[in-house]
Image: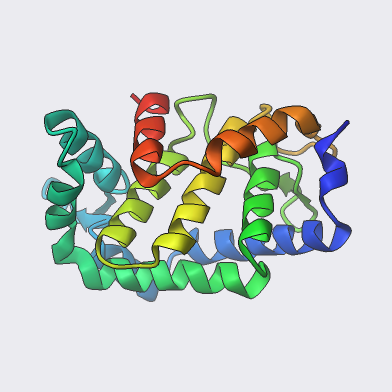
Amino acid sequence: MSASESYSPDLLSRAKEFWYIFDKRYLRDDHDLTQLFLNCNLLKLNPATGGLGFNLDWMFFLLKNRMRADPLNYEQSFSIEVLPYKDGIVKLANDQRQIINDHLRDFIEIQQAFELFGQGVLYDERREAVHKMDGTFPRHLVGYRRWHGFIKAAVSVGESIDFWLNLDRSMLIAYQSKLKPLDTKQNNPYVDKETLTEYESSCMSLDFKSLDEAYNYYFP
C-alpha cells in the first residue's frame, strides 16, 4: 500500500502552499530577514571580506560539541551559550511558527507536511520543481541538522516544548523518508505505508535527548 492514500487532497494542497510560503520567506534577501538572522548569530561579519557570511551551523555544532564534552549535562551548557541570542531566537521561532500555523491546523498535519516534504512528492507548478531538502544523500541534507540545532536553542530559551518537540520529531521522519526524489519530476514515488508507519512509530515517541543522539548519528 502506498502512503499516498494517507493524505487528503486538501492537506496536500495546504502542505504545498506552506512550503512555498516558507521558502519564499527565508530564501529572499531583505533587510528585515537579514536583521533577524544577525540577531541569532546565523549571519555574522566576515573579517576577511568585511561582508556578512552565513553561520547557519553554529547551533548544531555547539550542541554536538557539548554532547561530546559532557554527555550528562550538555543541555545546561548549551543553554548558557545560546542565551545571549535569546531575543533573536524567540523572534525567529515565532516567525516560523506563524507561517506553520497559518497553513497547518494541528500537530498531525505538521507531521504529514514534513513527511510529504521528505518524500519529495510535493511538485509545485509555480517553481516547476519539488519541495524537498536541498543536498545530496544522506549527510549533505544539512538543512535538517541546522533546523534541529535551532529548535534545541529555541526550547533552551523558553519556547514551547510541545510544539517544537513535535516539529523536531516530524523532521526526523522527513529525513528518514527520503527516496532521492528528482527535483523536476511531477510524480515522485511515495514511501510504502508500512515503512512510513515504522518511521512514525520510532520517531514520534522520542524525547529531545534521543533526537539529539539521532541527529548526531546521522550528521557525524
Which of 190 and 40 lies nearest the eye of the viewer?
190
Confirm whether residue 12 shows in the render. yes
User: Residue 120, relative to residue 69: is it above or below?
Assistant: below
Q: Up-down: is 209 above or below 194?
A: below
x and y percentages locating residue 154 in the rendered image: 32, 61
Closest to the observer, 63 or 133? 63
At x 67% / y 53%, what residue is drawn?
113
Q: Quadrant of residue 136?
A: top right
Seen at 63% across and 43% down, the residue is 132
141 vs 40: above or below: above
Using the image as rendered, state which of residue 17 and residue 107 is in the foreground: 107
Q: Looking at the rendering, in which quadrant would you find the C terminus? A: top left
Please provide percent x and percent y for residue 63: 24, 41
Residue 123 percent across, percent down from the top left:
77, 47
Instruction: Tell me if I can see residue 182 in this picture.
Output: no
Q: How is the image coloured?
A: rainbow
Q: Is residue 169 left or right of residue 69?
A: right
Give the quadrant of residue 156. bottom left
Left or right position of 155 against 101: left
Residue at 78% x, 60% y is 11
- Classify residue 118 as left or right of residue 125: left
Q: How many marks?
A: 0
Q: Name the residue rendered at 47%, 49% in the picture.
A: 168
- Residue 194 at what x, y percent from top left? 77, 29
Quadrant for the N terminus in the image: top right
